[in-house]
Image (cartoon, rainbow, N blue to C red):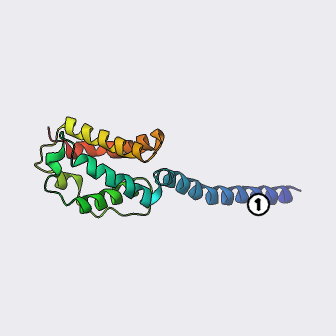
Amino acid sequence: MTSRFLNRFLQQAAWCLITFAAASPITQAAEADALYQQLGQKPGISRFVGDFVAIITTDPRISKSFAESDQERLAALLTEQFCQLSGGPCQYSGRSMEITHAKMQITNAQFNALAEDLQIAMEKHGISSQAQNKLLAKLAPMQRAIVEK
């Protein structure tokens, strides 16, 4: 009697472990992918990034920082970066934030202006406030590497 009970218990425990192990990666992948989906996947990200680049290159608060930038390359790198940060399948191929912004003397005000411009671009494309906040939260830690003064 004890042996049957123990076998049944072990079978149920094994089944629970298998079910949990199988569900866990799926749940984690779904959570990681959710922001990417909310942003419209790579095509959606590319669309709002196109507007974002147009906004930042004309914003008098920060346009000087982008005066000599290749706008197409900038848009492509930002698309990669946002895609990767949001859980998409992209791989960012640009330089580190430290190297890219070295000696540019970016201020907190300029960093905040850039974030405001990103929100404007996302709103124009109907990205929810929740998704905007999630992306901004993923970008916020970069402030330390970008802002010099």
**Horizontal side of residue 70 vs 138, given as left or right:** left
Residue 123 lies left or right of residue 70; in this view the side is right
Furthest residue toward right: 1
Residue at 34% from the left image edge and 58% from the top image edge: 79
Task: Identify the residue at image location x=27%, y=52%.
Answer: 53
> Residue 45 at what x, y percent from top left?
40, 55
Q: Residue furthest top?
A: 109
Q: Image point 18% across, 43% down: which residue?
A: 62
Q: Is residue 96 left or right of residue 12?
A: left
Q: Which residue is mark 1?
A: 11
The residue lying at 17 percent from left, 55 percent from top is 99
Question: Front-most of 31 and 7?
Answer: 31
Q: Amino acid at mark 1?
A: Gln
Q: Quadrant of the C terminus?
A: top left
Name the spot of residue 37 as percent of width and height, x first.
50, 54
Furthest residue toward left: 103
**Under tag 1, what secondary structure?**
helix
User: In the rendered view of the protein, which quadrant contains the N terminus?
Assistant: bottom right
| Residue 81 occupies quadrant | bottom left
The residue closer to the viewer here, 87 or 27, is: 87
What is the x, y in percent for residue 133?
42, 40
Q: Quadrant of residue 134?
A: top left
Bin the neighbour count of mark 1 within 10 Å (Cα to Cα): few under 14, some 14-19, many 20 and up. Answer: few
Count numbered badges in the picture.
1
Direction from residue 53 to residue 83 in the image, left or right = right
Pick the residue in front: 39 or 31: 39
Q: Foreground: 98 or 19?
A: 98
x, y (%) of residue 7?
80, 60
